Amino acid sequence: SMFALQFAKAAGALVIATSSSDDKVERVKALGASEAVNYARTPDWEKEVLAITAGRGVDCVVHLAALVGVGQSMYQAADYIDVNVRGTAVLLNQLTQAPPKKLVVASSMSVYGEGACVDASGNPMQVESRSLEQLERGDWEPRGPGGAALTPVPTPESKPPALESVYALTKFD
């Protein structure tokens, strides 16, 4: 979110940030946000944004908020689904009051599972799921067929999804 804030400010945009935390509201203001609204304290935050913009609304919404973490999402599924899915639904409902021209919603590389890997010859390979034996040995490296070592490489968006955690599921839908 700080990345988006800095780019928007560099482009000359009036940046209105939202957060559920007073500390984060102060932090984004210190980093250049023109305005910031704590939506936990201001349930009708969209009305506040309309007031700030004299009823015009916003041109672009960058929605990056999420409860983040792959491993812990498996043990806190309800929390992750509530924040990541219901939270986005609440935002979309509020945006019907004054639809922006653009909406950017972040996903996560976790939707690709292990990501892309190549073998020793540079050929793309599918990462095998880690066996119990591999985990017990503490061998966390990606392996291909027959246990061959693989090297991670940048993952293209064309890679098919491999939704292996609750977090990945909430970032895919």
Image (spheres, helix red, strand yellow):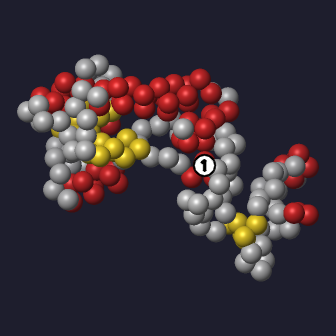
Q: Is residue 30 visible?
A: no
Residue bearing the label numbered 1: 110
Determine the image quadrant of residue 124: bottom right
Determine the image quadrant of residue 114: bottom right
Q: The C terminus lies in which quarter of the figure?
A: top right
Q: Would you place residue 117 above or below residue 30 in this image?
A: below
Q: Position of residue 104 (x, y in %)?
A: 37, 46
Q: Measuring 33% from the left and 22% from the top, which residue is drawn there?
A: 40
Q: Is residue 91 left or right of residue 53?
A: right
Q: Amino acid at mark 1?
A: Ser
Q: Measuring 87% from the left and 49% from the top, which residue is drawn there?
A: 131
Q: Is residue 106 left or right of residue 153?
A: left
Q: Would you place residue 101 above or below residue 118 in this image?
A: above
Q: Measuring 74% from the left and 75% from the top, which residue is drawn there?
A: 123
Mark 1 crowd level (few <14, some 14–19, many ≥20, 10 Å Cα): many
Q: Is residue 11 visible?
A: yes
Pick the front one: 35 or 157: 157
Q: Position of residue 79 (x, y in %)?
A: 55, 25
Q: Position of residue 108 (x, y in %)?
A: 53, 48
The residue tagged with tag 1: helix, strand or loop? helix
Pick the front one: 155 or 4: 155
Of all residues, the one furthest to the left in this rendering is 54
